[in-house]
Image: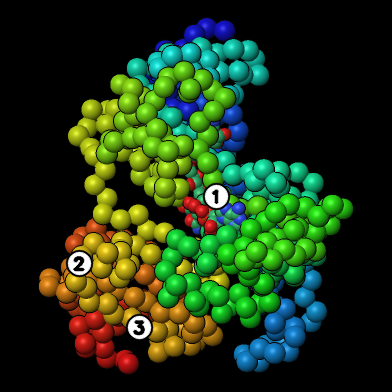
């Protein structure tokens, strides 16, 4: 097979890698992208997209079940609700297939050469790929490592048999009767809630004193109320010891006391680790930040011409961060003067209700010695929330006490994920409380709670 020479080689076609390659192609850079799996990476194939499809289906089924139970206040009654998880999974697979082939088309449109196979470094500028038709050598002036991350496996609970990784939990065709989730972070709570809505009896085992430790307790409380209403059992300050001798239960230790939790499936979601082994990276001896690749504000690694983006570079391991890094690196390779200057990377936890955060929380700001004004506005006082029959949660705004510069915005509530754009925009544009308060927010919407939270921080709330 003839060797390939190119200007830019991207290893990994997840959201970081494919966005980098598309932008590079648009800028006229001769670009090759290699992936061992399907275009779209973790996000598209076993992450963001399939999990949100399952969460949506579970929410629809749950609403129907409540109507069928005759309990709803809306006067809607339905007959006995049922779900065929095989059909749900097939629908989800269809979305993944459409988006993955969409990524291939976008890469082709940008004239990026796609090579399927596992890449392996020979040196910092040369990579070999095991393709279906033989070994392909690629030489590049610049290389972007966008190999992403993989689930952390617990030594006492290796994946296999009843022990599932998140990827396996997204492709079940039979509903587990009793599901124990080890790790109450993003994936554990998102998928644990979805399975509880689908009808599984769910227990979450979390090592820390609170689930979703990435968010403060004020934001997590409304989620915990719902979790308890759904009958999900949460064990905090607890650790999984291993399977019981006959394998039909999980042995758990809670504050020194051991017990067996019967389980037909155990989902382990205790974090993700960078994909840095098995492809010759060790020989490049790049600087590390813990297990991750160390990068500077231009995503440069310690080797000239070698960049790294996305999950392989550490927290926050989010698709939109990977994409933003990918776009930036493509422009840098094209000779443009770019550096990482984003003021915030918004985050969403797709629990019920959803939690969102952009910028600093009140505690973050205070721990930096900043005096702040904090305004809350509850959805219980928002007309749109009432008409949508879900008044749980609130919006919170954090601003400097002296200048009213908005440092952070958070919310918890139904459908608040769509507010992240407004939150990030306010912070990026250096908004002050007066800017948010003085912007006409359309009625009736949940976003009015953002304006009211800003007004409240200034002691001027109109609807509370
Ligand atoms: P990845 O998406 O992991 O892609 C890396 C790619 O590199 C893969 O396609 C892999 O096949 C390829 N690769 C690796 N090694 C090689 C090699 N040697 N040769 C060739 N190819 C290689 N983030 C959000 O922002 N929002 C969400 O709602 C969200 N939900 C998630 C839900 C789940 C269940 C999971 C697991 C993750 C979720 N994430 C979410 C995180 C998100 O998926 C990641 O942050 C994102 O995919 C990282 O992108 P990436 O490009 O760095 O790597
Ligand atoms: P996570 O870091 O969100 O949560 C892991 C949880 O497991 C933590 O609460 C931790 O305290 C707990 N834990 C660790 N070891 C444990 C043990 N031995 N026993 C019990 N609990 C233990 O990790 P995750 O849920 O696996 O998700 C991985 C990453 O994927 C996230 O950090 C996030 O970046 C990304 N993700 C994002 C979204 C989103 O944006 N909506 C959704 C899913 C995943």
Residue drawn at x 70%, y 60% as measured from the top left: 252
Residue drawn at x 42%, y 38% as measured from the top left: 290
Alpha carbon separation for disc pair 2 and 1: 31 Å
Q: Which residue is mark 2?
A: 370
Q: Which residue is mark 1?
A: 271
Q: Quadrant of residue 216?
A: bottom left
Q: Quadrant of residue 260?
A: bottom right
- Is 137 situated left or right of 229 in this image? left
Q: Can the viewer see residue 350?
A: no
Residue drawn at x 35%, y 83% as measured from the top left: 377
What is the secondary structure assignment of the residue under circle 1?
Answer: loop
Q: Which residue is situated farthest in the left direction here? A: 402
- Is 259 situated left or right of 449 in this image? right
Task: Quarter of the image for the N terminus: give it.
Answer: top right
Residue 43: image tag:
none
Indicate whether 283 appears above or below 17.
above
- Is 37 situated left or right of 198 in this image? left
Q: Earlier in the sequence, mark 1 or mark 3?
A: 1
Q: Which residue is mark 3?
A: 377
Mark 1 C-beta to ligand 2 under 8 Å: yes
Q: Where residue 263 sits in the image (x, y, percent)?
A: 79, 61
**Circle 1 residues within 10 Å: few <14, some 14–19, many ≥20:** some
Q: Of circles 1 and 3, which is in front?
A: 1
Q: Earlier in the sequence, mark 2 or mark 1?
A: 1
**Circle 2 residues within 10 Å: few <14, some 14–19, many ≥20:** some
Q: Can the viewer see residue 207?
A: yes
Task: Quarter of the image for the C terminus: give it.
Answer: bottom left
Cβ atoms at labels 3 and 2 below 8 Å apart: no
**Circle 3 residues within 10 Å: few <14, some 14–19, many ≥20:** many
**Which is more toward the observer, 403 or 53?**
403
Alpha carbon separation for disc pair 3 and 2: 22 Å
């Amino acid at each position: 097979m003839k060797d390939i020479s190119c200007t830019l080689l991207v290893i990994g076609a997840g959201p970081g890698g494919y966005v980098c390659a598309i932008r590079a192609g648009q800028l006229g850079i001769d670009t090759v992208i290699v992936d061992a799996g399907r275009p779209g990476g973790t996000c598209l194939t076993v992450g963001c997209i399939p999990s949100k499809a399952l969460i949506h289906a579970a929410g629809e089924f749950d609403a129907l079940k409540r109507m069928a139970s005759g309990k709803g206040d809306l006067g809607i009654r339905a007959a006995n609700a049922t779900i065929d998880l095989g059909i749900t999974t097939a629908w989800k697979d269809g979305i993944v297939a459409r988006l993955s082939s969409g990524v291939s088309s976008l890469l082709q449109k940008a004239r990026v050469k796609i090579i399927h196979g596992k890449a392996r470094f020979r040196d910092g500028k040369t990579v070999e790929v095991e393709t279906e038709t033989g070994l392909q050598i690629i030489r590049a002036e610049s290389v972007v490592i966008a190999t992403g991350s993989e689930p952390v496996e617990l030594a006492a609970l290796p994946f296999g048999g009843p022990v599932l990784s998140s990827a396996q939990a997204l492709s079940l065709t039979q509903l587990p009767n009793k599901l124990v989730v080890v790790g109450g972070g993003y994936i554990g709570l998102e998928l644990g809630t979805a399975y509880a809505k689908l009808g599984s009896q769910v227990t979450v085992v979390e090592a820390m004193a609170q689930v979703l430790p990435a968010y403060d307790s004020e934001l997590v409380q409304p989620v915990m109320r719902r979790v308890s209403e759904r009958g999900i059992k949460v064990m905090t300050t607890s650790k999984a010891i291993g399977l019981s001798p006959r394998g039909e239960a999980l042995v758990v230790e809670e504050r020194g006391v051991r017990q067996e939790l019967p389980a037909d499936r155990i989902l382990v979601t205790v974090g993700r680790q960078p994909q840095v082994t098995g492809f010759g990276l060790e020989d490049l001896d790049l600087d590390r930040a813990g297990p991750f690749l160390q990068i500077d504000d231009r995503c440069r690694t310690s080797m000239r011409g070698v960049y790294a983006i996305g999950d392989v570079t550490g927290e926050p391991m989010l698709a939109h961060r990977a994409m933003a890094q990918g776009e930036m690196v493509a422009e840098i390779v094209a000779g443009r003067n770019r550096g990482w200057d984003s003021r915030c990377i918004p985050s969403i936890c797709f629990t019920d209700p959803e939690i969102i955060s952009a910028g600093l929380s009140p505690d973050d700001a205070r721990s930096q010695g900043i005096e702040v004004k904090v305004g809350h506005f509850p959805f219980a006082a928002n007309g749109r929330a009432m008409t949508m029959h879900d008044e749980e949660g609130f919006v919170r705004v954090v601003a400097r006490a002296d200048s009213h510069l908005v440092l952070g915005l958070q919310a918890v509530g139904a459908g608040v994920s769509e507010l992240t754009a407004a939150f990030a925009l306010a912070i990026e544009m250096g908004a002050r409380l007066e800017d948010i308060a003085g912007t006409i927010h359309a009625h009736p919407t949940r976003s009015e709670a953002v304006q009211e939270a800003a007004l409240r921080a200034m002691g001027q709330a109109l609807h509370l």
